[in-house]
Image (cartoon, rainbow, N blue to C red):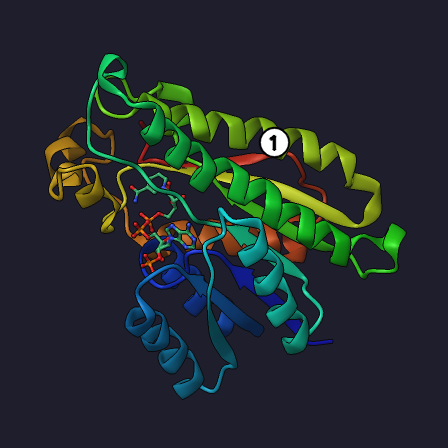
Amino acid sequence: MQKTILITGGSRGIGAATAVLAAQKGYQVCINYLQNKEAALQVVDSINKQGGNAFAFQADVSQETDVLALFKAVDQFGPLTALVNNVGILETQMRVIDMSAERLQRVFTSNVISCFLCTREAIKRMSTRRGGMGGAIVNVSSIAARTGSPGEYVDYAASKGAMDAMTIGVSKEVADEGIRVNGVRPAFIYTDIHASGGEPGRVDRIKDSVPMKRGGQPEEVANAILWLLSDEASYSTGAFIDITGGR
Ligand code: NAP
């Protein structure tokens, strides 16, 4: 049976690297994006040119109506076997004392509510209790859940802590329904996300404090994600892989 994967936020960075690797591993790939259609179509093109099968769908996964439309589109593509909750945002570095309620709302809606909504829709389709064929979910958290990101973005770190608690809880809820739910916790990966925090060169500033003395590449996170989704990880659920160069 053809495997079908949905990757939220697949137009660039870790999501795009995961999409390309998933296609190489035989998945049909649906990538979701928010604004950058051109980047999303480039990922789709590169997969299709290599003989894969991919499509892109615009949806704001923090909004329930968009999530429902996204999953309906994936249903046309094939039965969903894998979901990567990859969408995550952060905002300008600041201390908690300066954070507005609007910012907190945006960060928690984009990072946590989106993850709940997409996971809910995936479970409806994958659960063997509901006639599905099972599947696997990977949540892209962050090592910030452990460090708290003081002085930078405690809100972002807390949202990733919420994702981790959700990963553990949901993994136990659906463990006997053929669904595994795991997480990866990257840090210091060269992507555009650091520019959103107001510091595009953040990885290079920090890399000397990383035991491996370098930043990570999106492909190094994608490898862990694809392993957790694969049958090689068949007895792993509610587990996390830290991808941080040892920090
Ligand atoms: P990125 O380069 O900023 O890419 C973010 C992706 O998410 C883009 O494809 C963007 O789409 C999409 N997106 C954002 N909000 C969305 C929404 N509401 N609905 C749909 N799509 C949305 O990010 P990244 O660095 O690859 O990060 C991916 C994940 O890894 C995030 O969860 C992040 O927190 C986590 N992470 C990253 C690092 C790191 O060092 N890079 C470290 C730890 C954890 P558009 O391009 O269309 O806007």
Q: In the rendered image of this protein, does residue 159 appear above or below residue 10?
A: above
Kind of residue at disc 1: Met
* Residue 25 visible here: no
Q: In the rendered image of this protein, does residue 228 appear above or below residue 174?
A: below
Q: Quadrant of residue 202?
A: top left
Instruction: Say which residue label 1 marks.
Output: 166
Count of residue discs: 1
- Near-viewer residue (211 or 6): 6
Q: In the rendered image of this protein, does residue 31 appear above or below residue 237?
A: below
Quadrant position of the N terminus in the picture: bottom right
- Classify residue 29 as left or right of residue 12: right
Q: Quadrant of residue 40?
A: bottom left
Residue 219 % position (x, y) = 35, 57
Residue 172 % position (x, y) = 75, 32
* Residue 85 visible here: yes
Identity of the residue drawn at 42% across and 79% down: 47
- Near-viewer residue (216 or 106): 106
- Near-viewer residue (177 or 94): 94
How many neighbours does mark 1 have within 10 angstroms: few (below 14), some (14-19), or many (20 or more)?
Answer: many
Residue 15 % position (x, y) = 40, 57
- Near-viewer residue (237 or 121): 121
State the residue lying farthest toward the top: 97
- Classify residue 123 as left or right of residue 176: left
Quadrant position of the C terminus in the picture: top left
Instruction: Tell me if the residue at label 1 has its CB under 8 Å from ligand 1.
Output: no
Identity of the residue drawn at 64% across and 53% down: 232
Residue 189 % position (x, y) = 27, 45
Identity of the residue drawn at 53% across and 38% down: 113
Name the secondary structure under disc 1.
Answer: helix
Identity of the residue drawn at 29% across and 22% down: 149
